[in-house]
Image: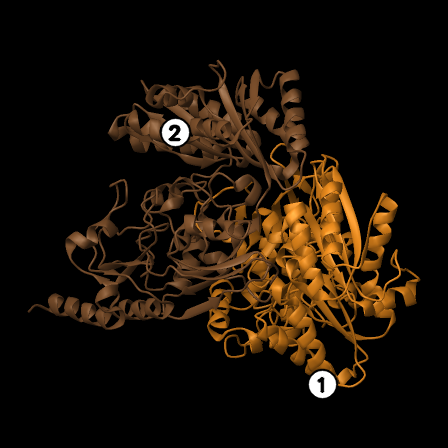
Chain colours: A brown, B orange
Amino acid sequence: MTDSTSTYDALLAALHSVLGDAGLVLTGEAMSPYCVDWRGEFGAPALAVARPKTVDQVSAVVRVCAERNIAIVPQGGNTSLAGGAVPIAGRAQIVLSLSRMKAIRAIDPVGMTMTAEAGVVLETVQEAAREHELLFPISFAAQGSSQIGGIISTNAGGINVLRYGMTRQRVLGLEAVLADGSIVEGLRHLHKDNAGYDWKQLLIGAEGTLGIVTAASLRLAPRPKHKITAFLAVPDPESALALLRHATAQLGDAIAAFELISPSALALVKQHFGLKPPMEMQSWAVLIEAAASLSGLRDAMEAALTMALEAGDASDGVIAETEAQAAALWALREHVTEAELKSGRSVKHDVSVPINRIPDFIRDATSALHNAFDGLQLVVFGHVGDGNVHFNVLGAAVEAKAAINRVVHDVVAGHQGSISAEHGIGSYRVSELAHYKQPSQLTLMRTLKRALDPSNIFNPGKVLNDGRSFSEK
Amino acid sequence: MTDSTSTYDALLAALHSVLGDAGLVLTGEAMSPYCVDWRGEFGAPALAVARPKTVDQVSAVVRVCAERNIAIVPQGGNTSLAGGAVPIAGRAQIVLSLSRMKAIRAIDPVGMTMTAEAGVVLETVQEAAREHELLFPISFAAQGSSQIGGIISTNAGGINVLRYGMTRQRVLGLEAVLADGSIVEGLRHLHKDNAGYDWKQLLIGAEGTLGIVTAASLRLAPRPKHKITAFLAVPDPESALALLRHATAQLGDAIAAFELISPSALALVKQHFGLKPPMEMQSWAVLIEAAASLSGLRDAMEAALTMALEAGDASDGVIAETEAQAAALWALREHVTEAELKSGRSVKHDVSVPINRIPDFIRDATSALHNAFDGLQLVVFGHVGDGNVHFNVLGAAVEAKAAINRVVHDVVAGHQGSISAEHGIGSYRVSELAHYKQPSQLTLMRTLKRALDPSNIFNPGKVLNDGRSFSEK
């Protein structure tokens, strides 16, 4: 028996004494779904997969690993688009899956709050809220498998950010385990709490590198009684911004989604799924949805459309008359990603810029790419109401990927934007973050990481990967 | 010339070389408004008051002080209710007033954002937003003198939190100076940005103990076109919660304020200002305001009132027909604090509890106080829609203040509430925070303080004051 074997056996014995058989996955085959991301792009082997059932077990697992300098990769639904939730090579590590912590501990319909454990699937939270005529408004494609701990650790966005904010704005309190195994229990249901540093904010969006979220108090919203959906053809992105002003003037903050779709994206959706806009059009499109408990949505939407058509900011538009029509309009937007997938490998960019810079960003990034590369096709869509553009590139050679990223991100940086609007850094964008982030901010990030996780055992290599700061084993 | 004189002279010379005559206040008389809070309850002398005009000057002042281990008390409008913005005794220190940094650097009406320096007065920000038909929704009594840096550092609340959130939710980016003098420039106008740790969240609400906010990107909101205000007599706080459910069902998140006022508070307002409710009543009152760009507010408010009256959750109610009537209803609420002041010294509590615990909290705290003390009069009011209760005690002996705090805060803790909903910790509540906060959370707070301000030069003795952690000179 070698030393490393006995070290390994001792680790497993210690983990087993905490977790039992039910909480420990050890065979390569059983571990593999935890060790590679859903697209098969990221991953590395782990020594074990721990599946604790309680916060005390999470704490005990962290202590076992901290003593041995074994890294821990926290994982929820494993739906990261940035390789944030699976191991990367170079470190002795385990995956810590929160998926067995799936209790909804409490719902308060008067205060409109819920306490959910990290492993509760997002859709389950949405449904539990709906049973009380309430809404948990975080919503995106992977909601059937992503988990609360993951959406908090990545500050997930989605289609309702314009009206309801990112996940950060829905979190009232957290329970978490820190790198020394200590449990911080801040599961408050308070809308106002200025008693001391709001440490939970630091864990939200830290991608599991500063602490492990085990449960959260969530802020629900009143479920709007009315909804209206419209689809417009607009001449160009500038017109979309003018339309946003018309819509804001009429609908105020009842606007829940304001999505821009490029002609190329609509063409791909038609080509692969046979879905077509409700009118003849070759131009850019905008999908607007508004929701409210008050009446008056339709009048306001009609007024906005009339203003836009009269001003030439839209050439045509329809308002959905039925739920089925609204769903058909949304299908045009929601099939873009799959249509893109069917068209071949794409180089994706999840960027944001100030809203008034969106037209310039799209123009500048497009021309910069066409100047630098031949034969590219651009698929542009996104949540324009909140400045988030998905700017994806088809037809690129595999080896051109990094160069394409650099061209697009340079344009983003020139417009004071972000290279990751909602998908996070994960392992995918670590070097891009290091390239673009202001040095004093990177230093501050490292200071925080070192303070909270001095041995770098939490999700090493994600968000930050600085050889000068952390010696990896 | 003694050593301390020469040290003092060297400090002043160094500050003068950064700030010039215009940026340095040195005489005792001129410094005194900076060294005592507006109620005259907190304060201590300072060696100097620095009034920098630029972020580079702030950085240079911090370096000058850091080299000499001189503490820095950052100050905005000096409107703290918790002694958070003035020196406390026991440390060689200067006040750093941000009030000369008062430029509004940019406004983007399309993206609905503004960049303002720390010294811009809140009301000035509100007015600048109004010029573009937009709203900066943070609003409270001291808005004519409180400054942006201060409201961010204290995560100010106010009367619109229910609809628009605390100050934290209006901050898109910060520029700040850290304890080593480094400048972090994160003035982004992005609604979505998941590129790295969101370090600004840590400075928001840290009361100047972790960094000095010098400018901010603010998120504005569409200005609602319609508003409606109602005033109801309700039998008790339980009925107020039932009324909140009726109002939420009808008005959704258009509800902007939902204020509860105790009979004793109304009686004081009548006694000192001659202001009376629009109906004969002896009971508790609720003031509701809702705002939206959509029509339909009046129908929804009438439906809510009808439901409440039919269910017996309200005994009477009026809806304001004019702006003047609405102002008269608000005057009943807004004069409570001044009426209380005219009634003598009060022991104030700015607490929050989960919304569904409010009636139990009021009942339990009231009986606990009456059991422990004789002759007290309770004045209860607050932003019930967000769980924030101002629970103030008249008629107490000066020496009973700490004991009264303890009784009320014990009840708050028993209901999983917060001892500071919106006023912050400052120096006033430092020992209360240490008493009630979970030890692992206090440890985490100290870890963060030590990481960002290892020499404890930023606002020492505020929020945390732990002799074990920081040796004061």
- Location of residue B220 with respect to A234 vertically, above or below: below
Residue type (three-letter) at the residue carrying disc 2? His
Question: Could you tell me which quadrant the N terminus of chain B lies in?
Answer: bottom right
Q: Can the viewer see residue B187 in this picture?
A: no
How many numbered marks, from 0 up? 2
Q: Can the viewer see residue B84 in this picture?
A: yes
Horizontal arrangement in the rendering, residue A430 relative to residue A415 (left or right): left
- Location of residue B456 with respect to A140 vertically, above or below: below
- Location of residue A82 with respect to A98 vertically, above or below: above
For label 2, the residue is: A335
Q: Residue at x 46, y 39 (%)?
A: A418
Image quarter for residue A339? top left
Q: Residue at x 32, y 25 (%)?
A: A394
Q: Chain of mark 1?
A: B
Q: Are marks 2 and 1 on the same chain?
A: no
Element marked by disc 2: loop
Residue type (three-letter) at the residue carrying disc 1? Asn
For label 1, the residue is: B371
Q: Residue furthest front?
A: B310
Between B219 and B275, the residue placed more toward the observer is B275
